[in-house]
Image (spheres, grey):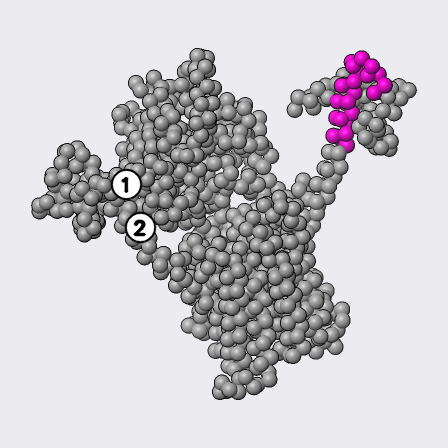
Amino acid sequence: MTAPQVEIQLIAAIVAAACALPGAFLVLRRMTLISDAISHAMLLGIVVGFFLTQDLNSPLLILGATLTGLLTALLVELLHRTGLVREDAAIGLVFPALFSIGVILISRYAGSVHLDTDVVLLGELAFAPFDRVVIAGWNIGPKGLYAGGVILLINAALITLFYKELKLATFDPGLAAALGFSPVAIHYGLMGITSLTAVGAFDSVGAILTVALFIAPAAAAYLLTDDLARMLFLSVGLGVAAALSGYWLAYLLDASIAGSMATMAGVIFGLAWCFAPERGLVAAARRRVRQRWEFAQRMLAIHLLHHERQPGGEPELQMEHLWQELRWDRKFATRVVSLAEGRGLVTQQNGRLELTDRGRLLAQESLLA
Amino acid sequence: MALPDLALDYTLRTVALGAMLLGLSSGVVGTYAVLRRESLLGDAISHAALPGIALAFLLTRSKESALLLAGAVAAGWFGALLVSAITRTTRVKLDSALGLILSVFFGFGLVLLTFIQKQPDASQAGLDRFLFGQAASLLRRDVQVMAIGTLAVLLAVLLLWKEFKLLVFDPDFARVLGLRVRLLEVILISMIVLAIVVGLQTVGVVLMSAMVVAPAAAARQWTDRLSLMVLLSALFGVMAGMSGAVLSSLTPRLPTGPTIVLVVSGLVLISLLLAPNRGLVWNWARSRARRGQVRAEGMLRQLAALAEHHGSLEHGHPSAVLRASGWSPEQVEHVLHDLESTGYVRQVGADRWAITAAGMARVRTAAEANKAGDVSAYLTGSGGEVTGEGQP
Amino acid sequence: MADRHNEGVPAVAVQDLTVAYRERPALWDVDLTVPSGVLLAIVGPNGAGKTTLLKAILGLLRPVAGQVLVFGEPVEQQRRRISYVPQRGSVDWDFPASVLDVVMMGTYGELGWIRRPGRRERERALAALDQVGMRELSDRQISQLSGGQQQRVFLARALVQAADIYLMDEPFQGVDALTERAIVMLLQQLRAQGKTVIAVHHDLQTVPEYFDWVMLLNVRRIACGPVAQVFNEHNLRLTYGGRFAMAAFAREVEETAPTVVTPDRSSSGGGARGAA
């Protein structure tokens, strides 16, 4: 690997980790689409900031873009509060309008300077190593690395510090308010770091793909664990995995790095969706099959319990009877009986079935439940 | 360019026609999407269409828009399908599923686009126009394809009018009536996909969702009737599409998609503020009036209680006595003067206030209405339960 | 025991409270005085403003008019003394947290910003889980709980707060018989400790059995006082209007009347106590 390759991967991993942290809370709070809106709308903030400062690296520009993100969240909330449109529609109204103004400003007035919708929207990670921080003549590394690193640190610090508050306000905002933790402050705090992260990520991965890094790793982690702290760590891990694998996919195809990272984030979610140990599609299918056999064995035990003391019930205890009485086909019945035998629920002698004590217990339990 | 030329100019006519079709189909379909709280499904579908376009090009090496749009339909449809599969089979909620599909499909589309650009024979393929739309690139054939899509959408709405109405209003009831709700939902999603694909070339994948949401959201403010809402929404869509496309064709460096979106956003803003009944301006005036009424009723009750206590309508009370409920002195004075002008209260001395017989009657009417258990009807002139929460 | 220093001050005093959601009033000129140490049920039809009243007492809503005092002070200064059990359906039970996690949330109020719960808080949470019979399930993921278990988790969380006033929004909604009994026992324990409970309640038949005060609410306050004094057909008819069928009340009287003699019910049928 060449030095720029290492640097690109490092930047990608750091940005992905920085996005995954607020992303986990966005997923749990059902606010992921606000992050979509913020990522789009901050284009306007970047453009206006650029016109004012003429410098894409100016801290003022970062501040302006972050405030635009917060403004977006505020506008969505205000519009929703009027009661005239639902929240989803409010999101769908606000960000296209702000984004459109940004695009028009760029095409009208910034045609000659280095500010391009594509760069803001799509990002260009491949150029990141060329934009370097030079202090007193010393070249100390690419700018993207420092920007991403600072944002990652801020996110990690704030989420560690306010972990308890975020957890409470996410799970039960009513209780948070009743206990004196302002859910509104927590909401806008989260929106603030979401905006800051989106702004920081825009020139490496671009606005729309930031959304993939906010959502996909967190959603995958949500399927893999039942513990909030673990979910946060997993989100970060999966985000980094998406960034690194995305880089190599882009390398193979000679295609957009940011796009490949988003694609890999989607693939990772897809894998979690299929193979998550408890909630995955495969696990669910296997559980259904197991339940079917388990249920059949219970049916068998109940059937036998029902008939074993019944006068004239003797014929019902024959294997032969099962597929009439329980409407099982021969193969199914044989399999159920052999499973039940294996578990020591029934014994079989010359086609006559008898419940063991364990089987009787199971049948009685099943009837009680 | 002078106006008469507008009607004659061939390119402009094509562009205007295309934009009208776009506004028409997305306006109609958007009504249903917005009412079903699926506003942002359009966002996911339009972004999801991008890899479809690129794949169609990669497979056929053709720039034929019918083919590219067929790819967009397939991918958009697949994206919508995945959204619904994710929400049904996992605990991931709708918003995350939408955002996930939107960004991942878009990212994949971007991978394909950059891949195509680096192919030796690709010569750009002009697929970039699908990002933000380029009305000027519309050809007669493109408009024909759009017309077919729009026609299909309109036909479906006309044929399945009452079914869709029920689907939007009460899906459970529709199921009870024996309607095939799943099938209807699939048809509705297909219509959304079609409408979005119709607009992709003009508005682009990034902003197309606005054309689904905005005309319908604006139309909703003016009417409570579905039929009227569909018509208005179509009208707003057509207006925005046409004026936006023409403006951007006539002005250099004015991208089509964003211009159309700004026009339609303007329509939404006007509707939100000014629509009769629901508009914010009216609403604000009404709620001011109501607040005043609540205060006045409270004041009147206090005075009535005092009058009963003293057994006389002649006994005046200073406004300071009436300040009980944490109101400022100014508010109390204001309310008292209002009540005086309606004849429920009179001033019997310097800062001495008493309720009149008419005022007593008013308090009694209020109490009666309350006994009937229908205070809200009494207050607002309409029955019904309290709906909606004040909290976000 | 709950408040020696302000004996005689009502636990909750609501005056002239009016709350409106947009156009419609949800509460209209409501007065309510709840003495310390009673179990109060708030009953009324759907849309009567019951949850709204709880939220207003908690200071979660801004009223159009009126005020709420808790132990004679604005609620903001008394937050520690109030605990809240929301409706079960108001939260997302898919949230990645264990039973213990949720119960510990009850300690967050006294911890304040930033400080984390430690071993002491953990012990208290476990003790509260003991009280509701859920200690063995403390590591269970909350999405795997039954409705009754979820309700008991919420109750345990409220107990951890060690408050003087408990506001509960339909604690009996959709719970199994076991949980219902557990909640009733808990209510009695709370009363024995001199705590005040205000609960939104749906089942008219169990009001005399579980509670000693009742408030009948339908946007306005219809009546409020000891069950024996105000829980009668006249007031119920006023509260429920035409919607209140005679038959329902007849059944309710029939079913509750003979049971008053059983020991545990006569202790909770607190008409005499409330009047005293």
The Cα–Cα distance between marks 2 and 1, rounded to whole angstroms, is: 18 Å
Q: Amino acid at mark 1?
A: Thr
Callout 2–callout 1 Cβ contact below 8 Å? no
| Left or right side of B337 for B197 | right
Say the numbered circle drawn on residue B384.
none
Residue beneath label 1, please?
B365
Residue B193 forms part of the magenta stretch: no
Count residues near mark 1 (Cα–Cα under 10 Å), then give few for <14, some for 14-19, many for 20+: few
In front here: C21 or C34?
C21
Is residue A11 placed above or below B61 in the rendered structure?
A: above
Q: Main secondary structure of the magenta part?
A: helix
Q: Assign a secondary structure to mark 2.
A: helix
Q: Position of residue B304 (x, y in %)?
A: 20, 38
Q: Are marks 2 and 1 on the same chain?
A: yes
Q: Chain of mark 1?
A: B
Residue beneath label 2, please?
B290
Residue A295 forms part of the magenta stretch: yes
Q: Give the mark nearer the N terminus: 2 vs 1.
A: 2
| Left or right side of A215 for A105 | left
